[in-house]
Amino acid sequence: MTERVEEALARIGRLDPGLCAFVEVWGEEARERARTVDRQLPLAGMPFAVKGPTGIRSYAAERLIAAGAVPVGSTAVPGPGTYWQTWGQGRHGRTVNPYRADRTPGGSSAGSAVAVAAGMVPLATGSDGAGSVRIPAAWCGVFGLKTTNGLLPSPDRTGLASAGVLTRSAAEARTYLDFVLGTPAEVRIPPPLPLPLPAVFSADLGFARTDPGVAAVVWAAVDRLVAAGVVQLPRRRTPFTLLDPRDAWREVRGGAAGTGDAGDAEGVRDPGDTTGVRAENDRRLDRLFAGTELLLTPVTPNRPHGHEGPGEVYSTALTWAFNLSGHPAASIPAGFTADGCPVGLQLVARRGADVRLVEMAVAAEKVAIRVRP
C-alpha cells in the first residue's frame, strides 16, 4: 500500500520546487498512514491532496480518509495580500501554470489544480465560491467539479461556496462522489446515459466579454460533441442569457454592490436590484432545465492571465452565477488557444444532479478534449 504514496511524494519532491503547488507536504505521516491502512478499505493507499491549510478538516477529506485514502499535503491558495482573482502562494513561492509559467493557474484552488495537472496526485479537494474549482481546472487542463450548493457540508456561511474536486479525468471524479456521498457499493456502476443529451450553448451568457480565441476553442469542442452524438443542440438556437450576477454575488458575499446594468429584463426594473437579478436568473435557469439536460459555456471569458493580475476582466464572469443559483457545474478540458493556454468547457446541470453531471462529463470528455498543439 506504500508504493503509490511513495510515487506521489517523489513527484512532489521533483516538481514542486518549480510549480509551487503545495503549502505543506506530510511525508512521514503519509508513509505511516500508508503502512498501517486497512488493506480491505476501497481506497486503501490512494494518495490525495487537500486544499489549503484547513483542508484536512473538511468533510470530503474525512470521508476519503475513512475509505483508506492517504493525504500527502495541503495545496496553495492565494496568500496574504494576494488579489483574490489571481494566484496561489506555495511553500517555494508563487504557484505557476504547468503549461505556461508566465501565467497563473487560476484560483483559489490553485495548488490543487496544479498538483493534479502535473501528476503529483490523482485527486485533490477544492472549494468553489465563485469559480474557485472550475477556473483552475480549466486553466490547468484537468477536470473540476463544483457540487450542488448544500449537498456537502461547507463552513461558508454565505451559502455560495460548495465542496469540489479536481482530478485528471471526469471518470476519476466518480471515486470522490461515491465516497463523499456514501453511495452503496451495489449502485456505484452508473446506468448508461441516453445519448444524445439535450443541451444549450452560450458563449457569453448575454453579458460576458468572451475572448474570441477562447470562444472558438469551446465552440469547436461543442461541435465535436454534436458530431459524435453526445449532445444535441436545439434547431432554433435562441440565445440563452442571464443577467450579470456580479453585484448580486458581491452583495451576498458581503461586498459593496455596484450599479451594474441589469438591463430591461422582464420583472427587473431597478439596475441595482440585486435580489431581483438573482430571482430572475433562477427563473430563467429553472425554465431552461425543465427542457434540457445541460447548459454549455466557456468556463472563463479570458485565457490564463499573467501574474500581475486579470486587469478589468472578471475571470469569474461565467461561473459565479451558478454559485448564486446552486447548480452543480463542471469544467472539462476543451483544447488550447494558439498561444498554448488551456481552455475549459463548463457543463451545468439541474440542482442535485451531481452524479449524472459527472457521467455526462465522462461521455463528453471522450470527444471534447484536444491535445496541446
Image: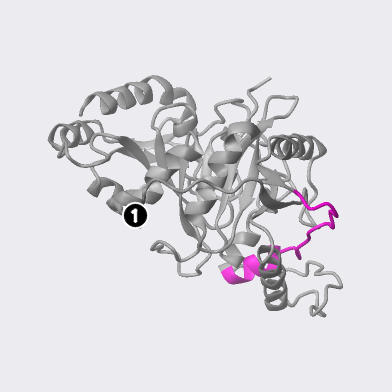
The image shows a total of numbered marks equal to 1
How busy is the neighbourhood of tag 1: few (under 14 within 10 Å), some, or many (20 plus)?
Answer: few
Q: Which residue is mark 1?
A: 183
Color encoding of the figure: one colour
Closer to us: 83 or 347: 347
Q: In this rendering, is residue 171 above or below 194? A: above
Establish if 245 lies above or below 61: below
What is the quadrant of residue 324 in the picture?
Answer: bottom right
Image-based side of 296 in relation to 81, left or right: right
Q: Is residue 106 shown to the viewer in this render? A: no
Q: Nearer the viewer, residue 288 or 145?
A: 288
Residue farthest toward the left in the current orientation of the protein: 36
Q: Is residue 263 left or right of residue 118?
A: right
Q: Is residue 237 magenta?
A: yes
Point 34% across, 54% down: residue: 183
Give percent across and percent down for residue 297.
70, 48
SS majority, magenta: loop
At mark 1, the secondary structure is loop
Identified by mark 1, the residue type is: Thr
- The spot of residue 325 in percent (x, y) is 60, 66
Q: Which residues are magenta?
A: 233-252
Q: Quadrant of the C terminus?
A: top right
x and y percent of residue 352 in the render?
Answer: 50, 63
Q: Is residue 184 above or below residue 273?
A: above
